[in-house]
Image (tube, rainbow, N blue to C red):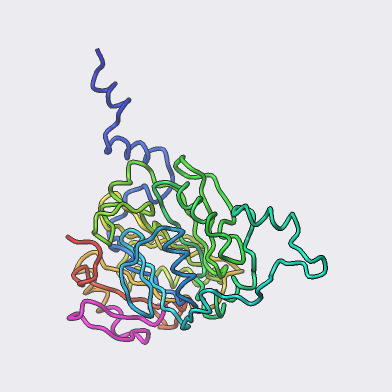
């Protein structure tokens, strides 16, 4: 006769499976979030040049659902966090179906397409497109593609899904979208390093611990019951060039935003937790090669009205404060600034919101 302990071993409960994952992993995202954690990253906003390649990459590759039909901004949900992309250039039908040469790939001297070229065209996994000039033209002005100065960490249910989808899409872009694989933290399919079509933004994609899949999916911002393979933006890494920037960044989040932060000489990690078992992070790390471009915008929700009110009181008199009110349940900051000197440390715009804001993806 099997005992209950034997059944627990053969078919562990979700709680037991999560406890086992937590005990055997050092990954911060499976550890309990500390007291004082913010609620959730509501959205990240990055400008993109063209609608169609952006829509194909995020909607077709990651399988993210669009949550808005704004004519000049694409919005996709990855769990409770939205990825928002204001589109900077209008597209014409010719731009979408760009063609710069009717007979590209045709050897005019020989008078035919070579056998090797024909073989390539029959294999979508090795052939990168009949006309790379067309693919470049479709992407528009690269300078309009905003770069996040770090990496996105994304948890999925099945890593084979984006692997297959991005391989199928590769012929539509002038460069590989899958650039590397890595050993996953929690087993399952191999981890993937994916870059966007403009080679500006990078995504580390791996399978979530199985014990957390239901918890993560329950936090979906779409609320339509559809089961997306992409579960969450579990972490954001933001690189800064100077190690001297780490201490004022940590002070900004602890003193101004009232957040729980872990700090080392070369990094600081801001903790967020929309529900028990879901531990999201925003980590600033020192990197001498970090890009210095405008980094877009991040929206963060406070975990309580009290935390939001204290953050508003700490920020509203600072030079970086750019608008908002307690009544509107949000305020805006032009940058991450040193709370002592008021000087901007990193050019990342912030929107700070109350959990009572009507767009809050986490409902009490």
Q: Position of residue 127 (x, y in %)?
A: 64, 57
Identify the image quadrant of residue 130. bottom right
Quarter of the image with the N terminus in it: top left
Q: Is residue 336 visible?
A: no
Which quarter of the figure has residue 342? bottom left
Along the line of sight, the residue nearer the viewer: 267 or 156: 156
- The residue under the point 55% across, 69% down is 200
Is residue 90 or residue 354 the one in the foreground?
Answer: 90
* Residue at 33 percent of width and 58 percent of height: 79
Left or right, 167 with respect to 158, comes to: right
In the picture, measured across the screen, residue 100 lies left or right of residue 238, that is right
Residue located at (21% from left, 68% from top): 355
In the image, residue 6 sits, relative to residue 215, either above or below, namely: above
Relative to 269, does residue 299 appear above or below in the rendering? below
The answer to whether residue 285 shows anywhere in this view is: yes
Question: Count of labels shown?
Answer: 0
Quarter holding residue 117: bottom right
**In the image, farthest residue toward the top:** 1
**Which residue occupies 28% across, 46% down?**
214
- What are the residue bounds of the magenta stretch? 313-338
In the image, 68 versus 79, the foreground residue is: 68
Q: Position of residue 243 (x, y in %)?
A: 54, 68
Q: Is residue 327 magenta?
A: yes
Position of 240 with respect to 155 (left or right) is right
Image spot of residue 149 (x, y percent): 52, 70
Task: Look at the image and tell me in which quarter the C terminus lies.
Answer: bottom left
Q: Is residue 182 magenta?
A: no
């Amino acid at each position: 006769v099997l005992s209950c302990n034997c059944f627990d071993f053969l078919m562990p409960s979700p709680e037991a499976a999560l406890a086992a994952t937590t005990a055997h992993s050092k990954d911060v995202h499976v550890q309990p979030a500390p007291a004082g954690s913010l609620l959730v990253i509501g959205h990240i906003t990055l400008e993109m040049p063209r609608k169609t390649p952006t829509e194909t990459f995020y909607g077709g590759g990651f399988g993210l659902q669009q949550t808005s039909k704004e004519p000049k901004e694409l919005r996709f949900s990855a769990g409770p966090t939205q990825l928002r992309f204001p589109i900077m250039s209008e597209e014409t039908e010719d731009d979408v179906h760009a063609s710069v040469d009717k007979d590209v790939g045709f050897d005019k001297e020989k008078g035919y397409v070579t056998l090797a070229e024909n073989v390539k065209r029959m294999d979508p996994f090795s052939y990168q497109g009949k006309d790379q000039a067309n693919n470049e033209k479709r992407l528009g002005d690269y300078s309009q593609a905003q770069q996040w100065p770090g990496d996105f960490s994304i948890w999925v249910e099945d890593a084979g899904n984006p692997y297959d989808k991005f391989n199928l899409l590769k012929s539509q872009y002038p460069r590989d979208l899958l650039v590397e694989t890595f050993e996953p933290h929690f087993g399952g399919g191999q981890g993937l390093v994916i870059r966007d079509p403009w080679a500006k933004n990078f995504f580390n994609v791996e399978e979530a611990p199985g014990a957390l899949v239901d918890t993560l999916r329950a936090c979906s911002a779409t609320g339509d019951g559809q089961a997306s393979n992409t579960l969450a933006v579990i972490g954001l890494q933001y690189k800064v060039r100077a190690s001297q920037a780490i201490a004022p960044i940590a002070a900004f989040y602890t003193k101004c935003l009232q957040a729980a932060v872990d700090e080392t000489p070369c990094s600081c990690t801001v903790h967020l937790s929309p529900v028990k078992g879901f531990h999201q992070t925003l980590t600033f790390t020192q990197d001498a090669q970090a890009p210095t471009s405008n980094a877009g915008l991040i929206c963060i929700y406070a975990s309580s009205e009290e935390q939001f009110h204290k953050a508003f009181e700490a920020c509203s008199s600072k030079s970086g404060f750019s608008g908002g009110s307690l009544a509107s349940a949000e305020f805006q900051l032009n940058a991450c600034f040193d709370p002592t000197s008021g000087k901007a440390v990193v050019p990342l715009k912030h929107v700070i919101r109350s959990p009572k804001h009507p767009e809050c993806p986490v409902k009490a």
